[in-house]
Amino acid sequence: MIQPDVVVTWLYQSDFFGGLLAKCVTGKVPVVWNLRTAAGDDIAGRTARFFRFLCASVSRWIPSLIIGNSPSVLSTHERLKYPKDKLRMIPNGFDSDLFRSDPLVRKQVREELQIANNEVLFGMVARRHKSKDHESFLRAAVLTCAQVSNAKFVLFGHGISSDDPVFQEILKDCELRSHFHFLQPRSDVKSIQMSLDVGVLMSNVDEGFPNSIGEAMACGVPCIVSDTGGSSFVVGNCGVVVPKHSVDKLHEAMLEFVSKSEASRLELGLSCRERIVHEFGIEETTMRHIDSWREVLTHVNAKSQ
């Protein structure tokens, strides 16, 4: 029979059932929960809301430690009555060898999309979901197209389609429809990230920790994000944060990026990559998890002596 030293669970159902099972079967083995969402009840599904309530009700008893991946995740769960003294932040980590700048890949993808080297490509990598604000992205893009001719835009993710009636309505009066690309999911996500000049993520709700922004930044791509939870945390001082649903501010930020020289965008992209490598490196975040497991195990062993 397996005798674990520490039981680590991820997401609400696993936190509840895994933690309960660990306490009932293994007794004193410490349990570490992991939280990954800052979504409110208006976005979280019925099942998630139910298990989040159950977890909150037993959070003082089952876990020895509760790890969230951004400040917004921790604050959300503090409001849900998770014990503050058990909450700790460890951000997501990124493999900077996997996500990096690659001029050859960039050239190949841009040729596929018919994007010239002197054109500025804005991209939003996000599934079609009520939590994501593709509409503001497209509305700002239409305004930008009306003022500059060298900006192009790509939407990429599950459920993205040029046949989307909402997208069609927004673009109906746009004279530069050819400047917009709608891509279905594909295996080479990082290739899309590498091809961008500017990454964008507009959200309708607080993000936990948007991996798409971290991946883009690791590829040396500066980003514009809405001020929604973990998005601004990931960007830090290396990008632009605009108010949620603010089409005008997003439009202004797009124009500002278009007006920058290629050298300026590259310099900002290098700062973005440095932030990811130094603040969110996969090796560092992995060790922080391992150290946390060792810490709770040491604490439990000390109490049992």
Image (tube, grey):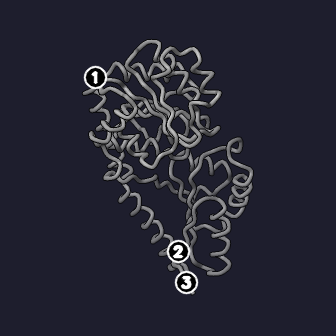
Q: How many marks?
A: 3
Question: x, y percentage for residue 63?
Answer: 60, 67
- Residue 216, by quadrant, is top left
Mark 1: which amino acid? Ser
Mark 3: which amino acid? Ile
Mark 1 Cα shell of 10 Å, populated few (<14), some (14-19), many (≥20): few
**Residue at 57% from the left image edge and 66% from the top image edge:** 9
How far apart marks 1 and 2 lie (CA) works out to 52 Å
Task: Please indicate, yes or no, whether residue 238 appears anywhere in the rendered image.
Answer: no
Element type where label 1 sits in the image = loop
- Residue 288, by quadrant, is bottom left
**Residue at 60% from the left image edge and 27% from the top image edge:** 167
**Residue at 45% from the left image edge and 63% from the top image edge:** 289
Element type where label 2 sits in the image = loop
146, above or below 263, in the image: above
143, above or below 52, in the image: above
Seen as rendered, the residue at the extreme bottom is 1
**Residue at 38% from the left image edge and 56% from the top image edge:** 282
The residue that label 2 is drawn on is 6
Task: Please indicate, yes or no, whether residue 148 appears anywhere in the rendered image.
Answer: yes
Question: x, y percentage for residue 107?
Answer: 30, 36
Question: x, y percentage for residue 211?
Answer: 47, 46
The residue that label 3 is drawn on is 2
Seen as rendered, the residue at the extreme top is 147
- Drawn side of residue 94 relative to residue 175, left or right: left
